[in-house]
Amino acid sequence: MEQKEIFQAVLIADNFTDDFSPYETVSLIPLVNVPLLDYALESLNRSGVEEVFLFVSSCIEQVKALVSEGKKQHKTWSINMNVEIVSSEGCRCFGDALRDLDAKGLIRGHFVLMGAGTVTNAKLEPIFEEHKNLCKTDKGAAMTVIYKRIPGNQPTGDEIMIATDSNTNRLLFHQKLKPHQKERRFNFPLEILQENSEIIVHHDLIDPQIAICAPSVLPLFADNFDFETRDDFIRGLLINEEILASTIYVKELPKQQYARKVTNWQSYHMVSDDVMNRWIGSNCQINHAFLFDGVEIQNNVTLEYCVIGKNSKIGKGSKIDQGTIVGDNCVIPPNTILSKTIARSTKPDEYDADDYEKLGEKLFVLKSEESVQVDSDDEEDPKIISTSVRMTQLESQFTESLYSSSSDDDDDEAPSPIQEDSNKPAKLFSGFEQLMKYFGPVVRNYIKGEAAMNDCLKAFEETFAQVPALKTRGHQLLHYFYDNEILSEDAITSWYENLDDESEAKTDSIAKFIKWLEDASEEEDSDD
């Protein structure tokens, strides 16, 4: 009985250049707050890889700590995939890494070869099977190199040209221009045109440094010490194809799959933009959401107008919106809907226990007037909780989240949204209305009674000195609070009468508003 071949991959953690100085290894560089190594491991896991040999030659302890921490946190790549670290401090290039792996005899069959700087959502398993079938018909097939087509006018930082046999996709020519190379021309040999009847020449592909390798690849590196990079390997096999009896094939990824390698700061910027624009994982919708470090988002998640705390996990199919604040380390079950509420990971104290509903081992949700829905996996009816909003929890948890995101900032006050728009008076009130649309019910519950109204008006007055736009728009804010019954007429008029003559809040527009209030009050009295 034939033993099932383990789906293996070799992941090279180092870039063996100083292009990312002061970083010593590309694998530890954060891209959109996530180390590049995490992207690479997750992409291999999604493709069904069962065993990964992570080769490290610099920052070995840091990489080990990162992998160990990922296992402790039960990151998705650590559940079904075994990651084994192979280290060698004396390794100076890509070729040395593969020669070291060959000497250790860890690879037993075909394998995926990729760098830790590669970010992709490619489905590699079908390509892997296609490569193995190809090797049955071409015994000399050593490697299938994967490329991704891009728009012709898009800069890449790594210009390449390849030529392939149009019938078999066998690689015939490969040339890469180095980023700092002055000569920007390709030298295409005429003999390729003379010896092949049908070829395709590509200059619209990028090389994300993903390859499917036959078992012969590692011995080829071991026998040829001049192979220092993967490009050296490809060039060497093309030049000495008959001598080495080895061929290389090309596979182009479909349009809906993404792959790119971070090789320098230019490509780092491009991939960062791609991730933020959701070219990867486009089945998630993230709009006007603030995510802290370490947030994990699964498939088909919608996040809108919300805050997600550090190291929280959002289950597939969940929707979080309408000003919801999720605290640190929360685990939100699949298909959960949270709206206009607050979530925390720990059980509230005895005083607040009645105000929270437990929806998971690490999810306690503040009861609100809006519905909180959780769809169970066994398709039972969704659980709906309806209660009141409490501003005290919102204020404390939101402020705590803001301060935990700053490093050593000792400012006395956190910046307010009004201050950020101080140079845009026309947008000040519209922006304020948008905020109140979501937080209005909470604010009304918080500003109750004469003392609370006085505190609110005092803060309003203090802001005048910091925000020049209030001198022309302040009366609109007061009018809004009055119309929505947050501030009473008596509180506003009393506050204004007690203002010092030098107060910044004593503007003509506010004086006219106070006069309007008094006239309206007199008309009501006369009608009575």
Image (cartoon, rainbow, N blue to C red):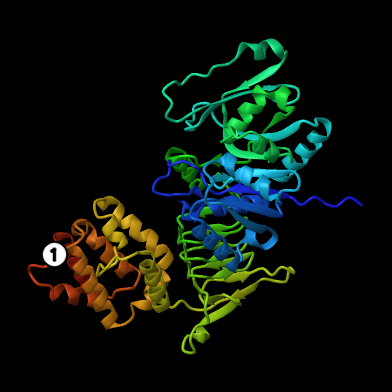
Asked if 162 appears above or below 260 in the picture, the reply is above
Q: Is residue 160 left or right of residue 236?
A: left
Give, as a three-letter code, the residue at label 1.
Answer: Glu
User: In terms of depth relative to the viewer, which is nearer, 457 or 141?
Assistant: 141
Circle 1 residue:
504
The residue sitting at 17% across, 67% down in the picture is 515
Asked if 256 appears above or below 286 in the picture, the reply is above
In the picture as drawn, the residue positioned furthest to the right comes out as 1
In the picture as drawn, the residue positioned furthest to the bottom comes out as 350
The residue sitting at 69% across, 70% down in the picture is 376
Q: Position of residue 330 (x, y in %)?
A: 54, 70
Task: Name which quarter of the figure residue 144 lies in.
Answer: top right
Pointer 1 local density, CA inside 10 Å: few below 14, some 14–19, many at least 20: some
Q: Position of residue 152 (x, y in %)?
A: 53, 26
The quadrant of the picture occupied by the C terminus is: bottom left
Q: Is residue 311 left or right of residue 111?
A: left
Q: Position of residue 38 (x, y in %)?
A: 56, 55
Residue 520 visible: no
